[in-house]
Image (tube, grey):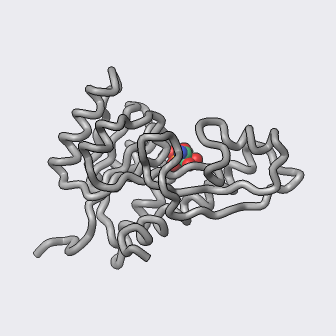
Amino acid sequence: MEKYPGKKNIAVLISGRGSNLKSLIKYSNKKKSLIKIKLVISNNINAKGLEIAKKSKINNQYIKYSNKKNFENRSLKLLKKNKIDLICLAGFMKILSKTFIKKFSKPILNIHPSLLPKYKGLNTHYKVIKNKEKYSGATVHIVNKELDSGKIIIQEQVKILKSDNVETLEKKVLKIEHKIYPKAIIKLLTNS
Ligand code: GRF
């Protein structure tokens, strides 16, 4: 009998710490979860997330990012081999090409630490604090060919206190990220 009947096969692409990967693993381990994480790919050999995947006995692959085309072609092969239905980008620091998105042809999600469409790109917490924003948050969205611009699946906000700095804001937002990423997957897969 199949061990994960009906579950969707997920690949998580990472570049570093892997705390979102950890939260996705935690969700996937629940009996009623809709997903099985079949593959973790990192472009960074030193990514802590690779260790997390290893500990959870998930197929984890480092693919050298010598150039975009090479990395993407090798990834596509693995994604196909593992019958991946959905890619989750979780702290993946490279921009996927239009060709990759088209060739994969199934949904790709990304998590971004701001209330998109505000603060696309890098150093979001720094910019948010510098601009004295009252709220920040996290967003899970579909990946399209424009950076941090695809359809928003879930967004949740946090209040910024006067006492907050880049580090404390990052912690607060990360907590939200870990909560909303599994929720966004459920929403996407159940069309709810
Ligand atoms: C998160 O803040 C995520 O929103 C952003 O990169 C960070 C990755 O953190 N895209 P982690 O590797 O999941 O801990």
- Which quarter of the figure is the N terminus placed in? bottom left
Is 171 above or below relative to 178? above
| Image location (x, y in percent) of residue 179 | 55, 65
Q: Residue at x 28, y 44 (%)?
A: 102
Q: Residue at x 19, y 52 (%)?
A: 82
Report the side of 133 relative to 150 (left or right). right
Q: Residue at x 68, y 52 (%)?
A: 171
Is residue 143 visible from the viewing direction of this image? yes
Is residue 55 visible from the viewing direction of this image? no
- Which quarter of the figure is the C terminus placed in? bottom left
| Image location (x, y in percent) of residue 92 | 45, 40
Residue reaching furthest right? Answer: 162
How many labels sit on residues? 0
Report the side of 9 relative to 27 (left or right). left
Report the front residue among 57 and 16. Answer: 16
Is 145 above or below relative to 156? above
| Image location (x, y in percent) of residue 123 | 66, 36
Is 159 above or below relative to 143? below
Report the side of 89 relative to 177 (left or right). left
| Image location (x, y in percent) of residue 27 | 42, 67
